[in-house]
Amino acid sequence: MEAFEHHFRESMRSRVALLDKITHYIVKRKGKQIRPMFVFLCAKACGTFTEAAHHGAALVELLHTATLVHDDVVDDAWQRRGFFSINALWKNKIAVLVGDYLLSRGLLLSLDHKQYRLLHLVSDAVRKMSEGELLQIEKARRLDITEEVYYEIIRNKTASLIASCCAVGAAASGADEDRIETMRAFGEKVGIAFQIKDDLLDFGDSETGKAKGGDIKERKLTLPLIHALQQAPAGERRKMKSLIRSGSDKPEVVEEVIHYIQKSGGIAYARKAMELHVNEAIALLDTLPESESRESLRALVHFTINRTS
Amino acid sequence: MEAFEHHFRESMRSRVALLDKITHYIVKRKGKQIRPMFVFLCAKACGTFTEAAHHGAALVELLHTATLVHDDVVDDAWQRRGFFSINALWKNKIAVLVGDYLLSRGLLLSLDHKQYRLLHLVSDAVRKMSEGELLQIEKARRLDITEEVYYEIIRNKTASLIASCCAVGAAASGADEDRIETMRAFGEKVGIAFQIKDDLLDFGDSETGKAKGGDIKERKLTLPLIHALQQAPAGERRKMKSLIRSGSDKPEVVEEVIHYIQKSGGIAYARKAMELHVNEAIALLDTLPESESRESLRALVHFTINRTS
């Protein structure tokens, strides 16, 4: 990971002082770097660990950072990871430009090293991520999202990046197409479980965390509520929908909806769906030869769904 | 150009209805498409016209459209080409995502057709464009920009995209590295002349146009003012700078500055610099074998610097 960080910092260097200041700031506030970890562990678990894995990890992290910076614009987020967001500090204008710059550095890095396969896997993830977010916006104000649409959104929006990390790791280690596809599917299932966990946390699925109900406030329909509405009698469903429509910004409405979801088994249903995806992911992992890296991947998956925030 | 438009429309197609609606809107309000024209003419003037030129033109236009959509966020522009901007209609959020989506489609298009060289040329332009804009922002509030910095900004911000169009056209036609570099240099000079013309138009360099002074209002130092300040005696320079600093938003100050620039020969100086770049560009063109496409390129260059808006 240390060698990677050196690589990553180097890959962002620019002649523009303002840009260097911002990328320095980005490196300092960096998160858990789960994505490069997926790349490295998948590379090791699938075959030989080479330079290509480093390029793949830097590509994925540059891209992920670019989308985070762009997301700051998208979400009008004023804080991210406890620091002020790039957006708040330097305004939307700069955030968009820095995101584009990081994207271009990722492109050049992979082209310079002729990592075309890795670049294709990651470009595909960029396409899916923007499509997924746009699909979510398109459906945002509708209260009749089906489970099918929900899965399409999170498969694209969240899971595609982790899926590409795993596929990139496999491809970088010289795995054949079948194995690359297995690892992609593994990452996708992990990503879906990750997002369901995220949605559950919003309803208080942890010993320490309190239900925040932020998704309800924004009228973002997630699995627990979708299921609760789906299995409700028509009259009850109508009543809940008009309650959300009329006052999703009021704390007492949010509380009532959360209570309704808990009572109607929406939480339990979503937790089951999450576990199902985790089990399917682990089953795919079991097709790999036994190794330390495979066990680390297993641990990483369990960490993902057992987190409390 | 008709075949190109079909290609271009196809390359944006998505399964997300909202996205299709927006890209349809983008195609409808499309501009003069000068960039694909540079690609096609350079390809024809340098050698054989192949499918690769189509991919190159679509790549460049997807990228250019992505940056325009992102620029709508950047500039907080409410109108673009007489229509409402994507930004105004669908908000920043969507503009960023649509830009990312178009970028990814361009990437996938070139990777699917193994056009790695073209992609490299264009990625380099993306890097330079964002660096150039960030450099301009960094220097925006300083009134001591030198000509050297001015050229660095416009070479990156504006000229790099036209330079990459010309290089892409040459590369797509199978030209050797020397010729690709010649065409890149040609496009860069055209792009610099284009930007100087743009800056001149802001001071009323046309029979029909009126000086708007928008750049002064935003304290954006361009060549005519840079030169005027540079050659002024120290006392006069100080006076002008403090005038701009104190009231660049007042119409009477803008008018006074414009008058000063005209009087001190800043306009004439910038016009000469523009013509110098055009002549250098034409000289590079003359190294190509005689052809109809070469003459069309010559005409396109003259159109660029003789426009009145």
Image (cartoon, coloured by chain):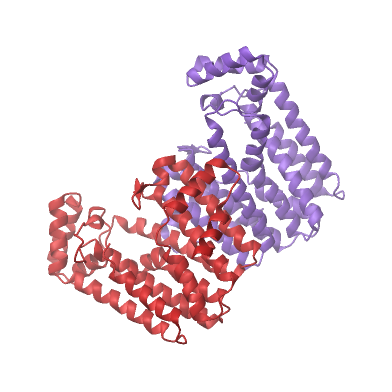
Chain colours: A purple, B red
Q: Residue at x 44, y 66 (%)?
A: B35
Quarter assignment of residue B15: top right
Quarter assignment of residue B282: bottom left
Front residue (pair A20, A235): A235
Q: Residue B44: percent from the left, percent from the top?
A: 51, 77
Q: Which residue is drawn at 57% across and 13% down?
A: A239
Q: Which residue is drawn at 56% across and 23% down?
A: A213
Q: Residue at x 74, y 29 (%)?
A: A273
The answer to whether residue A217 is left or right of residue A46 is left
Q: Residue B74: percent from the left, percent from the top?
A: 39, 50
Above or below, comparing residue B295 to residue A156 in the picture: below
Front residue (pair A34, A105): A105
Q: Residue furthest front?
A: B2
Q: Residue A15: percent from the left, percent from the top?
A: 45, 64
Query: Count the marks: how many?
Result: 0
Give the quadrant of the C terminus of chain B: bottom left
Above or below, comparing residue B190 to residue A13 in the picture: below
The answer to whether residue A298 is left or right of residue B238 is right
Can residue A7 be seen? Answer: no
Front residue (pair A291, B173): B173
The answer to whether residue B180 is left or right of residue A181 is left
Can residue A256 be seen? Answer: yes
Q: Residue B28: percent from the left, percent from the top?
A: 44, 52
The answer to whether residue B263 is left or right of residue A67 is left
Above or below, comparing residue B54 to residue B256 in the picture: below
Quarter assignment of residue B185: bottom left
